[in-house]
């Protein structure tokens, strides 16, 4: 079987629930991706049957210096990227039927679907979660993923062109891979969605109010 026989599509809400259930049952972590990370899933299909999933989300760690941090961290040179420019490939699960020894074994299936998903995530994630502050960094620049070396050796990440960034005392490795740039059409669409999205408008309104309040305090503060 060729990897090109596999297809991926963006999960609907019910399919995201299915993907979370699969990783609970079959992934070595046996835990879903935290909802606070705003997870997005791709469903992998083979002959119109679900045979896997990939789940992305914002990293749980908001800073990893000097790699990424807050917008202010970038301004002062403490971090190269803001955390809004990072996406986490949090879970990858493929049914054993298409893995080595399975009845429908497909060589390089995992690296193929990861490449397909990484090509799409840069736009799909921001279309579903438009940025709030367009004057700050918001385009997705890099994807990270973690590997617990007690269970895996990181072979999949190296095969998928990720680079090893660091390893902590618990033998958790962090891998990273650059992402493509948005096309002009994707960029224009996301800006338009950000300007219209209720959540984005709400956050911009809160910031304006806070700025006006702070400006008022500065004016009336005695010398």
Image (spheres, grey):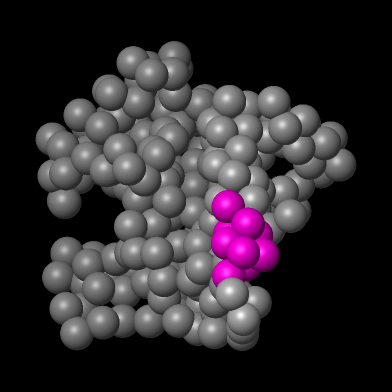
Provide the residue span drawn in magenta.
213-221
Q: Residue 215 falls in which quadrant of the image?
A: bottom right
The number of discs equals 0
Residue 118: x and y in percent read 57, 48
Residue at the location (32% across, 43% down)? Answer: 36
Residue that extends furthest to the front in the rendered view of this protein: 222
Please tell me whether the stretch drawn in magenta is mainly helix, strand or loop: helix
Please say if 145 is above or below 213: below
Q: Residue 132 falls in which quadrant of the image?
A: top right
Please say if 54 is above or below 7: below
- In the picture provided, is 215 more to the left or to the right than 36? right
Residue at the location (62% across, 64% down)? Answer: 220
Residue at the location (34% across, 33% down)? Answer: 52
Whether residue 12 is visible: yes
Residue 72: x and y in percent read 57, 72
Q: Is residue 104 magenta?
A: no
- In the picture provided, is 185 more to the left or to the right than 109? right
Q: Is residue 218 magenta?
A: yes
Residue 194: x and y in percent read 68, 34
Residue at the location (45% across, 81% down)? Answer: 65
Residue 93: x and y in percent read 30, 41
Please say if 98 is above or below 168: above
Please state, as top left, top right, bottom left or bottom right, where the C terminus lies in the image: bottom right
Please say if 61 is above or below 125: below
């Amino acid at each position: 079987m060729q990897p090109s026989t596999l297809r991926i599509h963006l999960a609907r809400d019910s399919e995201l629930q299915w993907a979370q259930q699969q990783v609970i049952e079959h992934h070595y972590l046996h835990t879903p991706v935290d909802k606070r990370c705003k997870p997005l899933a791709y469903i992998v299909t083979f002959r119109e049957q679900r045979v896997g999933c990939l789940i992305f989300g914002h990293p749980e760690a908001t800073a990893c210096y000097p790699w990424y941090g807050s917008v202010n961290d970038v301004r002062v040179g403490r971090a190269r990227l803001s955390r809004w420019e990072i996406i986490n490939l949090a879970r990858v699960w493929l049914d054993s039927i298409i893995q080595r020894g399975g009845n429908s074994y497909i060589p390089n299936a995992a690296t193929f679907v990861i490449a397909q998903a990484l090509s799409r995530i840069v736009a799909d994630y921001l279309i579903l979660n438009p940025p709030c502050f367009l004057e700050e960094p918001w385009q997705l620049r890099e994807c990270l993923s973690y590997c617990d070396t007690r269970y895996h050796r990181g072979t999949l990440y190296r095969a998928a062109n990720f680079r090893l960034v660091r390893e902590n005392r618990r033998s958790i490795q962090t891998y990273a891979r650059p992402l493509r740039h948005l096309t002009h059409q994707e960029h224009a669409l996301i800006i338009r969605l950000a300007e219209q999205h209720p959540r984005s408008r709400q956050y911009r309104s809160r910031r304006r109010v806070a700025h006006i309040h702070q400006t008022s305090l500065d004016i009336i503060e005695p010398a």
